Image: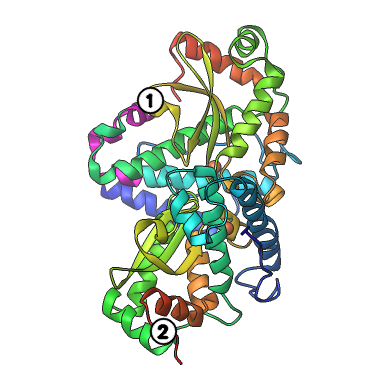
Amino acid sequence: MALNRRTLLAAAATIAATAGLPRFARAQATGPFTLPPLPYATNVFEPNIDAKTMEIHHDRHHQAYVTNLNNAVKDYPNVAAMPLQEILAKLNEMPEAIRTTVRNNAGGHANHSMFWEVMGPNGGEPEGELFAAITRDLGGVDTLKSRFNDAGLKVFGSGWVMVSVTPDGKLTLETRPNQDTPIMEGKRVLFGNDVWEHAYYLTYQNRRADYLKAWWNVVNWNKIGERYAAAKAGTLAI
Amino acid sequence: MSFTLPPLPYSHDALAPYMSRETLEYHHDKHHQAYVDTGNKLLAGSPFEGQSLEQVVTGSYGKNAPLFNNAGQHYNHLHFWKWMKPGGGGTKLPGDLQKKITDDLGSFDKMKEEFVQAGVGQFGSGWAWLAVKDGKIVVMKTPNGENPLVHGAKPILGCDVWEHSYYIDYRNRRADYIKAFLDHLVNWEYVEEMYKAASGHKAAA
Ligand SMILES: [Fe+2]
Ligand SMILES: [Fe+2]
């Protein structure tokens, strides 16, 4: 224990000495939950999403959800041992003292982990079973996009617009406030877009509609196709 | 009576560096304007047409969410601009107010601490407030377009903690923004004016 702490302190000192340089080497709170690294460079989505936004969004906002979640569960080993999706599905069983903090931060951790995953360069187009499901349940790709954009625009304040998926592959357009997620009702999220102002303010300011429209340019349909298959196989966690 | 957007009571660069010209241009000229425009569209033909802004806010709460959101934000922003001034903030409050804050909240510093905590603790979009409730000054926080009026209290100071208020100048550092608001921007004379109105005092003759 003492050794661990000393090692940590030494690591923290090293990091302090090189502060501001390595993006992924920043000290992280210890705990069961960790910030997944971005699977691409911060500038790959320019000009649709600027590099500064990607950096702050991932390194600061998402990191804060992870840190706050770890802090909240540190005195509750049985909660700390649970998978994220189970925590979210059992919020009303969480100790009351940490329930709201867990809801906000476990939700923020899950939503952002999904968000980085469903974006990517050269993401392709919806194909196969995914394409068929979008056509069947959401009126086709163009209709989905316009309904999704309208729904995202109507979220008043912070929140998300998402498409959820049932184990038998049925798709539903959903919106949630703040960091809530359909996972809280035992559902799975196929993909979603963050409409908190921090997701777009540096480039789009008050023009959320423009951001929603541009976001389709960075969607990773190949990955969403994999998530769709995983949801049907019962293996999609977050 | 429809909603109208009054000009800022100071120039767009008057609050820099604590709140930049760019922030005020978007926040006042675009965000507040949008609440006014959308609010007017929703007000037209509704049962609330012709009522005072306060009546629309309290009457539409829980009954007509889109109208409430925009009317609430119109009310909140109307006062928000007046709750700030160049060279504001600091610790010199008009007489009565200083004493009332000390009596009800312990001390000026404790009030500030609680106010920052309320703003930081408001998860997502919303506001931090000083309000008069049952004759006492209390610290409150509300989500999105809500304000103390719909919770049986009268707002005397509000700080907008929607990310659009501070993202250009402070990025994710909301606490720094609220501290700067308290230390450098608050127009305590306007807070006192609202405090007197809220506590039923007549303005000094
Ligand atoms: Fe976000
Ligand atoms: Fe605002």
The location of residue A143, given as percent across then percent down, is: 68, 21
Above/below status of B30 relative to A164 = below
Between marks 2 and 1, how big is the CA–CA gap?
53 Å
Residue A114: image location, x then y, percent: 52, 29
Q: Chain of mark 2?
A: B
Relative to B180, is B2 above or below?
above
Say which of A228 and B75 sits in front.
B75
Q: Nearer the viewer, mark 2 or mark 1?
A: 2
Ligand 2 occupies quarter: bottom right
- At horizontal 51% and vertical 10% (from top left) the residue drawn is A169
Residue highlighted by disc 1: A185
Residue B202: quarter of image: bottom left
Q: Which residue is mark 2?
A: B202
Q: Which residues are magenta?
A: A70-89
Q: Nearer the viewer, residue A46 or A129?
A: A129
For the point 69% across and 69% down, which residue is it? B7
Look at label 1 and name its amino acid: Glu
